[in-house]
Image: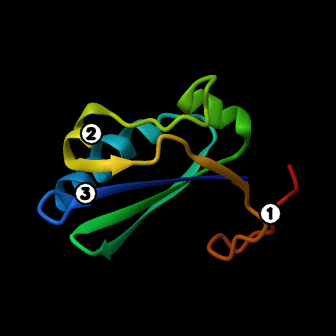
Amino acid sequence: MIARIWHGWASTDNADDYQQHYNSEVAEHLQQVAGFRGARLLRHQDGDEVMFTSITFFASITDVVAFAGENYEDAVVEDAARAALTRWDARVTHHDVAVDLLSGQPVSKS
C-alpha cells in the first residue's frame, strides 16, 4: 500500500472552507479511483495559519498515477482548494506503508 502525503496552509478564517472542500469534492473524486484505500486529513494550528496534512492511501503506485497523472509527484490542487489555501506543497511524497494498525491486517510488500 502507498501513502501519498501533502501539506497545505490556510488562514484561520478560511480553514473550515478547505476542510469542507476536502470532505466533499476531494472525497467524492477519490472514491471513484480504483485502488483508493482511504484518506486522513490532519489539521494543526500553525501560528496565524492552519496547516493541513493530507494522507491518501492507494493499493499501488499505478493507482496513484490513475489519480494524479503521469507526473504523479506533482500536487493535485483544485481551484476551490487554491481559493481557500494561502500556500501548499507543489510536490507530494509517496511512502510504502510498512505497518497499518488501523486495518488490523498485515501489509504485504509491493
Residue beneath the point at 71% across and 55% down: 95
Q: Give the residue type that dot 2 points to.
A: Arg
Q: Position of residue 81 (x, y in %)?
A: 28, 42
Q: Is residue 35 above or below residue 2?
A: above
Circle 3 residue: 10
Q: Quadrant of residue 5?
A: bottom right
Q: Nearer the viewer, residue 57 or 70?
A: 70
Q: Give the residue type that dot 3 points to.
A: Ala
Q: Secondary structure at mark 1?
A: loop
Q: Is residue 106 above or below residue 66?
A: below
Real-space Cα separation, disc 3 to disc 1, in angstroms: 34 Å
Q: Nearer the viewer, residue 70 or 91?
A: 91
Residue beneath the point at 32% across and 57% down: 9
N-terminal of the two: label 3 or label 1?
A: 3
Q: Give the residue type that dot 1 points to.
A: Val
Q: Secondary structure at mark 3?
A: strand
Disc nearest the viewer among 3 and 1: 3
N-terminal of the two: label 3 or label 2?
A: 3
Disc nearest the viewer among 2 and 1: 2
Q: Position of residue 48 (x, y in %)?
A: 21, 70
Which residue, as the protein is rendered here, is positioned at the far right? Answer: 109
Residue neighbourhood size for the residue with mark 1, other residues' Cα within 10 Å, grouped as few (<14), some (14–19), many (≥20): some
Q: Is residue 15 above or below residue 30?
A: below
Circle 2 residue: 82
Q: Position of residue 91 (x, y in %)?
A: 54, 42
Circle 1 residue: 107
Q: Secondary structure at mark 2?
A: helix
The type of colouring in the image is rainbow
Residue neighbourhood size for the residue with mark 3, other residues' Cα within 10 Å, grouped as few (<14), some (14–19), many (≥20): many
Real-space Cα separation, disc 2 to disc 1, in angstroms: 34 Å
Residue beneath the point at 56% across and 46% down: 92
